[in-house]
Amino acid sequence: MRIPKDWPLLLGSVLVAAALYNHYMGHSAYSVELVFIASGIVLALYSLIHVRGEATEPGNGILTDLLSKVITREQSAVLIPLAGFLLVAIWSGWKLLKTGEADLRLEDFIVTLFGISLVLYNAGPSKYATQKDFVVLYLMFLTIVFAVIWKTYTIVSGDSYYRINAYSEYYLINIPVVFIVRMFGIGVSSELDASSHGISNYITFEYHGRDILLGIGEGCSGLYSAGLFFSAFLAFVLVRYRKVDPWILSALGLGFIVTWASNIIRMAITIMIGSAYGAPALAFFHGYIGIIVFVVFVAIFWMLIVRWLDRVEGPTKPQMAEDVVTEGQEPKATD
């Protein structure tokens, strides 16, 4: 199966985002996170080298094309970086003045990167417009998911935030995981404590006659990984196909199912390893192997779904910033 040429940047971005997410949630060991970040950077740099070696024409970029419908390109060249500066300043000011918090959390890191990507959007050769578009759109959707939607949800839900999460995790995560593990003849049970503001869900399994209690926290729910998938997939299809239609929405819905299933399978394998080899083996798998299982599942799905979308959609090339050549004139050279 031939791998599409524009995947290195996608896979590299997913690896870096997965490493940052796992570091924030405490799901993986530092060595795994460093390997993921290093691999992601190498893939991203390779994607730029790959483009440099191709005879591609310069592009305007999606943001510039959209803004050019209402303002001039010169104005958009000023507005986009200005929006990046304002975003970082407003977010930082709101956090410090409204919440009184100065620590750097996952959403702060995402918003800051998004702002920086806007500031640097017009920097560099225009033939890298596709890569820049993917990075900016990916960070924009991550900002919408983790900074806008998630924050709004926590504010609106108020005191019921933890109880809603507890029941959601119990029925969407615990029950399916317990069902799969029991299919392999392993004795396992699940418990829900919706009154707790910490870990509310537990899965108990036996190892050599001793019960081991495994807490299922918010990070195990798959909500964050679903947000990562949604952001990367939507950015990828917008850059590749320049549209969102029923076929793409169907692929997005299927992707959510695959993301949820991969998280269920990862947790089920973790418990089965703990049941067979004990808590140290469980911790090793959880810290070193679990994220790899998730990335492999998502990568295989992505390869298959994009091949299918290419058949029904056909990749659309970005609009090129070509000089208009009138009859009797020589075309102008481009950088």
Image: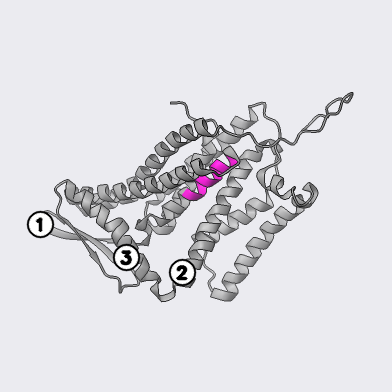
Viewed as shown, does residue 201 lie left or right of 297?
left
Distance between mark 2 and mark 3 Cα atoms: 15 Å
Look at mark 1 in the image and give the residue it sits on. Answer: 209
Tell which of 293 and 297 is nearer to you. Answer: 297
Mark 1 or mark 2: whose residue is earlier in sequence: 2
- Dominant secondary structure (helix, strand or loop) of the stretch shown in magenta: helix
Asked whether 79 falls inside the magenta stretch, the response is no
Mark 1 or mark 3: whose residue is earlier in sequence: 3
Distance between mark 1 and mark 2 Cα atoms: 41 Å
Residue 55, given in percent of the width and then of the height, sits at 67, 26
Look at mark 3 in the image and give the residue it sits on. Answer: 167
Q: Amino acid at mark 3?
A: Tyr
Secondary element under disc 3, as helix, strand or loop, is helix
Could you tell me if the residues under marks 2 and 3 are in contact, i.e. CB atoms within 8 Å? no
Distance between mark 1 and mark 3 Cα atoms: 30 Å
Q: Quadrant of the N terminus?
A: top left
Residue 159, given in percent of the width and then of the height, sits at 41, 76
Asked whether 234 falls inside the magenta stretch, the response is yes
Of badges 2 and 3, the one in the foreground is 3
* Residues rendered magenta in the picture: 230-240
Q: Amino acid at mark 2?
A: Thr
Q: Residue at x 37, y 62 (%)?
A: 218
Q: Which mark is residue 154?
A: 2
